[in-house]
Image (tube, rainbow, N blue to C red):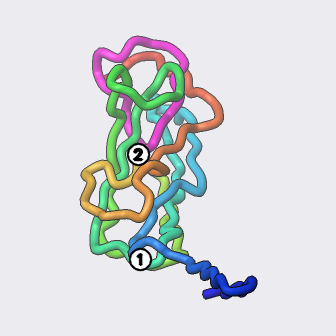
Amino acid sequence: MDRLETGTQRQFTAKISAFPEPDLVFSALSATISSTGQVVVSSSVKNQGTLPTSGSFTIAFYLSLDGALDRTDVLLGTRSRSSSLKVGVTDDATSKFFPPSGIVPGSYYVTGFVDAGFTQIESDESNNQATSAGTVAIKGGR
């Protein structure tokens, strides 16, 4: 706490911090197409919070025409982190998904959403999304 005295007045400045919580963010997200037509998603999720996660959580990946996650995007697949993620630790994984049946061929961004099941109470719930820098060419689904 800082204190400043001027004449007969005293002013105090105090830092108030939020409750300690985990904070899950993408530190990397990219996607390519394999020779078999699978979308290969490489993702890194970091806990930049002040506490470890309280257990497992799910990461969902979507195909998006514009890179902004909304209800028009198509679920590509999910991956799960089955144990707690400690503070400052990054979980790296590569996941492979066949495009869903009925998908319209085209160029899609891959958008990820950390803690898709909302199982973690985080210090910042607004930073759980990331989008691949480039698009992948989807020829159709299975």
Callout 2: SS: strand
Which residue type does callout 1 highlight? Answer: Pro
Seen from the viewer's position, the closer of residues 70 and 11 is 11
Label 1 sits on residue:
20
In the rendered image, residue 14, in percent from the top left (x then y), is placed at: 56, 80
Which residue type does callout 2 highlight? Answer: Phe
Q: Left or right of 108: which side holds 51?
A: left
The residue range painted magenta reads 95-112
- Classify 10 Å Cα crowding around label 2: few (below 14), some (14-19), many (20 and above): many
Task: Tell us which disc is closer to us: 2 or 1.
Answer: 1
Q: Left or right of 105: which side holds 57?
A: left
CA separation in Å, label 2 and label 1: 22 Å
Callout 1: SS: loop
In the rendered image, residue 138, in percent from the top left (x then y), is placed at: 48, 21
- Classify 10 Å Cα crowding around label 1: few (below 14), some (14-19), many (20 and above): few
Residue at point 61%, 78% (across, down)? 13
In the rendered image, residue 103, in percent from the top left (x then y), is placed at: 35, 17
Label 2 sits on residue:
113
Q: Left or right of 56: which side holds 127?
A: right
Q: Quadrant of residue 4?
A: bottom right
| Magenta stretch: includes residue 118 | no
Question: Are the residues at dot 2 and dot 1 in contact (C-beta closer than 8 Å)?
Answer: no
Query: Closer to the N terminus: mark 2 or mark 1?
Result: 1
